[in-house]
Amino acid sequence: MKKVLITGANGFVGTFLCAYFDRIGIPYRRAVRKEEKGVGSDTVAVGDIDSQTDWSSALSDIDVVIHLAARVHVLREDADNPLDEFRRVNSEGTLNLARQAAASGVQRLIYISTIKVNGEETFDRPFRADDDPAPADPYSISKFEAEKGLVAISLETGMEYVIIRPPLVYGRGAGGNFNRLVNLVKKGWYLPLKSIRNKRSLVGIENLCSLLSSCISHVDAGNKIFLVSDGHDVSTPELIKLLGTVSMRPARLFSFPPWLLNCIGTMFGKGMELRRLTGNLQVDISETCSLLQWQPPVSLEKGLKDSV
């Protein structure tokens, strides 16, 4: 049984992943930034994550690293140079961990990247893992730079990488856009999204954890990039109706011209946020399912019900 180091273990995904590993019996160590009181499990505080972080105590007797810790989107960015800040944690911090992991004898590093490495929106077909990358913002650029660095370190050291690019991850306690949408539905807001005809891929936290567990030792996972989703794409109105059903609230939707909605959003500096509600973003997980003999174990409806 391989022992796994989980970085960012007290974050949204990390908390669920630790509980999931407890259920299925995978031994792990938690890596967090700050000391935690009352935590009885195998936990190591490593401080801030950057090019200088010392991972030696966390990596002792570890076979596989699952790297979740990252600088993610912030609603009100206050850094003078956001790209430098994203690079410091997501690029330089990741590659520093990877070099120390390889030196410590770690066999495989599983890196949670983002579908935004592929781009912000799909048009004629879903994204595939072998598409030409098109990162467009500081967050996705820093993630793509980390991916390229991991490939180089793997070629140099022989440590395998696994890169996973998820779309929006939802589940109980999720923040960001999903949480805001859930709150709008629960509060009974009327939303001008009834006329939207889009398709978007999501992944529930249970399905993401299932895929991560498969990638720990699967012989065909090494040195691969995988896309992941629930395998069931939905339009924004369909998603809102499902959220209303599982939260026992009426889904209040009314029609409004999508082009005008996007224009208004752009005028008020919310164009990108609105595109995530009105545009398409689909991923093709057929290669993931085929190579790993894996299927999402939890349906979209069940995942949403568990979330709210």
Image (cartoon, rainbow, N blue to C red):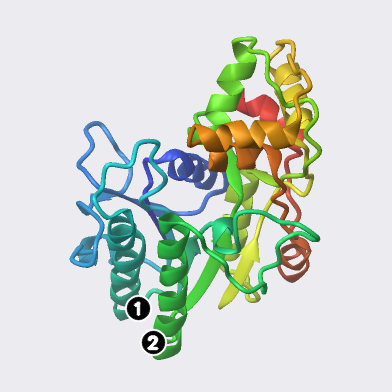
Tell me the tag on residue 48: none
Q: Secondary structure at mark 2?
A: helix
Q: Position of residue 279 (x, y in %)?
A: 70, 44
Which residue does the numbered mark 2 point to in the structure image?
157
- Please name the residue shown 57% across and 47% down the image: 24
Q: Earlier in the sequence, mark 2 or mark 1?
A: 1
Looking at the picture, tell me which residue is in the foreground, 128 or 64.
128
Measured in 3D between alpha carbons, the distance from the residue under mark 2 to the one under mark 1, in whole angstroms, is: 6 Å
Looking at the picture, tell me which residue is in the foreground, 303 or 57.
303
Looking at the picture, tell me which residue is in the foreground, 54 or 184.
184
Which residue does the numbered mark 1 point to in the structure image?
102
Report the quarter where the C terminus lies.
top right
Q: Residues within 10 Å of mark 2 (few under 14, many from 20)?
A: few
Q: Position of residue 98 (x, y in %)?
A: 35, 72
- Please name the residue shown 39% across and 74% down the image: 106
Q: Amino acid at mark 2?
A: Thr
Q: Amino acid at mark 1?
A: Ala
Please say if 286 is above or below 234.
below
Q: Position of residue 269 (x, y in %)?
A: 48, 37
Q: Residues within 10 Å of mark 1 (few under 14, many from 20)?
A: many
Q: Position of residue 161 (x, y in %)?
A: 49, 74
Give the side of residue 191 with respect to residue 234, left or right.
left
Q: Secondary structure at mark 1?
A: helix
| Residue 20 visible from this viewpoint | yes
Tag 2 and tag 1, C-beta contact below 8 Å: yes
Give the side of residue 124 with respect to residue 276, left or right.
right
Please say if 115 is above or below 177.
below
- Please name the residue shown 46% across and 56% down the image: 137
